[in-house]
Amino acid sequence: MSASLQEDEAAALLATEAAALDGYFSETPLSPTPTYPILDTSFTTAIIITNLPRVNSTKLDKLVKVITKLVSRIGTLASTDDFSGVYLPIDSESDSTFGFAIVEYASVEEARQAVEVLEGYKFDKNHSLNVIPYQRAQELESVDSTAEYVEPQPEPFRERPNVSAWLEDPIQRDQFVLREGKETIVKWSDGKTEPVVDYDGSREKEAGVAWCEYYTHWSPNGSYLATLVPSKGVILWGGQNFEKIARFPAPGVEFVVFSPQENYVLTCNNRRDDPNSIKVFSIQSGKLLRAFPLYPKDFLPEGMTPEQIPPPAFQWSHDDSYLARMGRDLISIYETPTMKLLDKRSLITDGIHEFQFSPKANILAYWAPEHGNAPAHVDLIELPTRTKL
């Protein structure tokens, strides 16, 4: 076969292939733009553990293994191919570690729990651990150590409204709140005559602001009226003229729960993607004490979705000493005002279906249905000793 014939056949084959691909390729010039994941620089899932033993490079791997085993009991580490989740820097000059480690978890809640559980932990006979969030270390780094110390000045005393003023009504009337359309009105009622308006938000209307946009809730003893403005949070009102007592930032808030003794208020926005969906505030100081995700870790059974199971509710003890929530086969009990986990561990309650605090004592009752060879049972637990009654 001649060379020219082979060239003709090759050209024909290429023409056939080109015809088959006609219209398949775009003539528009390509300028691809890479898409990168969002870089998280907040370090909200990282903690710093200090007061660790100082070791040289020959013992470094052993110390890392011991620390990794300890911290991984609390939650899942944010490990990759190049990072185990635990980092111990070492001084190249002295060939020794600095006595601290940086640990990163997979979630904010796990990091927060690690701070609680590991603080004061007896690592060995000579070392008790100190643990702080990484963000706190960043704040301390920005402090000017050379500046002269200036003692902070206490805020001027401001007398709070008398939140029991409604009890001093000379004709012993009661109050109720009415939410109608965009209006929120508090009225007096004696049960005999037509209710009369006590306060309708006129002061806020004149100022061009809303005193309520969504929902209202009285505290258990009637001391406070909580109004919800989802764009801002929760506002507490009280006293003879319904003065603003406090505002708690809780964007998207949908409902609130007061503690029985009116020392604390819990807010919730019902967002499953928000690690701080539930917030607990001190009413007296206005400070955020702790935040929680809508569902506890590993609460949902395999194959179930949040749409199928509602989130477990928090419950207060009768005297505001404890706040508790059910998890999978456990109850997490938090002490006030620190909001730290009682004894740094949850109460194991295999098969728990529901629980409730006693209305008169710090006793917790929980029920578990029949499971396998274990019969259904109700247990009474005394707090803080965890004694089964």
Image: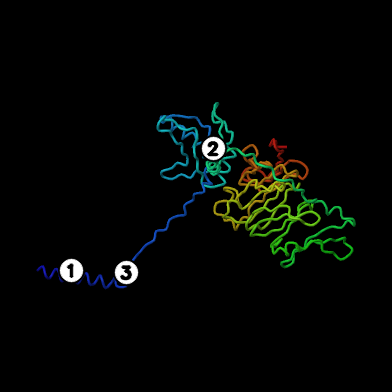
Task: Residue under label 2, please give it.
Answer: 146
Q: In the image, which is nearer the foreground, mark 3 or mark 2?
A: 2
The local crowd at label 1, few if under 14, some if 14 to 19, many if 20 or more residues have their Cα within 10 Å, is few
Kindly report the distance in space between the C-alpha atoms of the residues bearing marks 3 and 2: 66 Å
The reply to whether callout 1 and callout 2 are in contact (CB within 8 Å) is no
Q: Is residue 120 left or right of residue 19?
A: right
Residue at the location (86% across, 53% down)? 168
**Which three-letter amino acid code belongs to the residue tagged 2?**
Thr
User: Label 1, on which residue?
Assistant: 10
Mark 3 burial class by Cα count in 10 Å: few <14, some 14-19, many 20+: few
Q: Is label 3 in a helix, a strand or a loop?
A: loop
Does residue 261 lie above or below 31 as drawn? above
Residue position marked by numbered label 3 in the rendering: 25
Can you see residue 197?
yes
The disc placed on residue 263 is none
* Label 2 SS: loop
Q: Nearer the viewer, mark 1 or mark 3?
A: 3
